[in-house]
Image: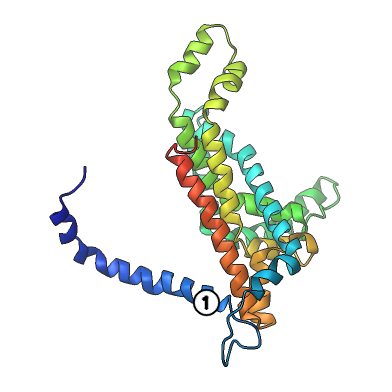
Amino acid sequence: MMLPVGRRWAALPLITPAIALQSLFFFLPLFMILLVSFTSRDSFFFSPLYTFDNYVKMFRIYRIDFQNTFFLAGMAGLIDIIIGYPFAYILLRKVTRFADVFRAILIIPLFGELYIAYGLLYLILPGGPVSRLLDALGISPLDVLYSAPMAIFGMSLYTLPFVVYNIGISLQGIDRSYEEAARCLGASRLKTFLRVTLPLSLPGIITGWLTSFGWNLGTFAIPVLLGGPILGTRVLANQIWTTSLVTSDFGMGAAIGVMVVAITMVVFYIVVKLSRGVLV
């Protein structure tokens, strides 16, 4: 219900402090980063000369980093769908008595990517629990650390709760009478799932993948700690840190950051539209 114009204006003093804080700590830094992204390396500290050179050079110099970022984020989203769909189905339909256990496990990734990275490092490093278990079974240790698959696995764990949430909402919106009608017409459980449940939950799958993809575009700790210093795991977030703090090319670092933020905003704009049913 729409409030009268007078009451809406009366609420303005109440939200003014929040708007001021948002502007000070969010919009102002973003504007400053955008401004810095148009400065050259040589003119940053003294007399800034604004130019588009950083954006022109960025796609040429960091082409591999763009490809790595999109590939790792996309694959992590795909793994999230494969793992997250059964998770969401179990939590929503309560097909097992251990649904609460699955719900508790799903909270763990919300502690942050740094905890996930160090937790996985502890598990798979030589002398860790996984290594000791494999030794006890007479199996040679897995050589997966500092590789693209390990980085993808860590990134998928990091965004798994968001994918489960999106798929769960989609499953919750499915009218169970459709599935019951299919069963009454002689369809098996598997056929009912493939012909009814899965197609109707497709919007949740798409928004879940996009959410995972957009969130992982800016992931920094997991590719560094689990992917290691190899070409296949060098992503844009790493290059922001390297160009800004190692080579002191603040203009290029800001340009990469602006590009990551812009792509992420576009992805989440699509997610919001899909969630509202505008693009479906």
Q: Nearer the viewer, residue 132 or 167?
A: 167
Can see residue 113?
Answer: yes
The residue indicated by pointer 1 is 35
**Residue 59 quadrant:** bottom right
Q: Which amino acid type is shown beneath numbered disc 1?
A: Leu
> Residue at horizontal 52%, vertical 29%?
96
Relative image position of residue 246 (x, y in whole percent): 68, 81
Query: In the displayed structure, would residue 35 be above or below residue 14?
Result: below
> Residue at horizontal 56%, vertical 39%?
206
Relative image position of residue 42 (x, y in whole percent): 66, 88
Would residue 72 appear left or right of 101 to someone viewing this image? Answer: right
Query: In the displayed structure, would residue 258 be above or below residue 181?
Result: below
Relative image position of residue 186 (x, y in whole percent): 57, 6
Residue farthest to the left?
A: 6
Would residue 139 appear left or right of 78 to someone viewing this image? Answer: right
> Residue at horizontal 52%, vertical 12%?
182
Query: In the displayed structure, would residue 23 be above or below residue 40?
Result: above
Secondary structure of the residue carrying numbered label 1: helix
Relative image position of residue 66 (x, y in whole percent): 70, 60
> Residue at horizontal 63%, vertical 46%?
77
